[in-house]
Image (cartoon, rainbow, N blue to C red):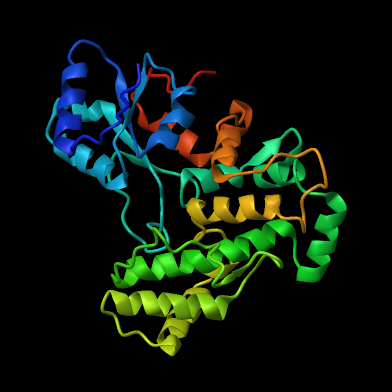
Amino acid sequence: MRMAQSIPKTPQALASEIHIKALDNSTCFLLLEGDFDLRFWETRLNPHDLRPVECGGKPAVLATLNQLQGQVVLQRVFGLVDADFDRVLNRAKPPRVVYTDEADLETSLLLLQCSLPAQMNMERLLAATVDADKKRTFEQHKGCSLVEHVRRTALQFGVLRLLNEQQGWCVSFEKFSVLNSQWFDRGELTLRIPDLHRAFIAKLKEVGHGIELQQLSDLIQSCEQHGWFSSWQLVQGHDLLAVLATLMNSELLRRSSGRQQVSETSLQRDLLLMHWHDLQTCRMVRDLSAAVPAGQRCFHT
């Protein structure tokens, strides 16, 4: 039985609950960040050997593990959390923690290579909605593949998220959507980067940081020089799903008939249906299998 929660529990409460539940069985426990993680993993885990526990965020997962320090039950508790920018910033991975392959679970699943057909999962989802001729025209106009256009668009927000964390600016991205018409042209499906940067500078000033546009540009250029702009390392699932849904719904790309509107929620539902055969190639699956005690079987096979 899963340990889910509608109201987030404190790490102390979660640790106590795990300790009590561990008294009468030998089950291991997998601490997860949130509801999507729980829904994705609970149908794939072998509940006799590994029980999922929703903690309500990455800090709560790490704090719960910390609460269990010094207790025997800790040897049966693991955390699976979003890597976020930990690899980029060279942060040490906490003990008993497994990271997602990419920055988060959604991005990891979208970039996963599927076997039937043999293509990236994101390409499979796009092919189900996007008109092939429109896609070809769009790619010729942009000078890159549709997937690459998605990556470049989401990346521009990812680098701002990275700098916000790296510099300790504490800007809230809750209402700072990648699709705001102030900087995103829905007709052309293009991000107006100078407008985005000016809006971000304004957000910085709201929280007391007098950063000038040139300073921001220099910081972004430094990230580019590290090679982070040529990969998916800075792309966050929140931004990626928003961009994907918008492109798939656009008249510029979608088929003229026979398709329903796509949303971030519907894309998440599609990700929940990933085939286990494809998931076995994930590093996080291999790492978790290697972490549990010998003789324990993490997953249904």
In this rendering, the answer to whether 94 lies above or below 2 is: below
x, y percent for residue 155: 54, 64
x, y percent for residue 107: 53, 48
In this rendering, the answer to whether 25 lies above or below 165 is: above
In the figure, residue 193 lies in which quadrant?
bottom right
In this rendering, the answer to whether 210 lies above or below 266 is: below
Residue in the image at 66% along x and 64% along y = 186
In the figure, residue 69 lies in which quadrant?
top left
- The answer to whether residue 171 is seen in the rendering is yes
Residue in the image at 61% along x and 65% along y = 152
Residue with the most extreme left position: 70
x, y percent for residue 198: 47, 81
- The answer to whether residue 220 is seen in the rendering is no
Residue in the image at 42% along x and 65% along y = 161
Which of the two residues, 160 or 108, is positioned nearer the viewer here? 160
Residue with the most extreme right position: 133
Residue in the image at 80% along x and 70% along y = 141
Quarter holding the C terminus?
top right
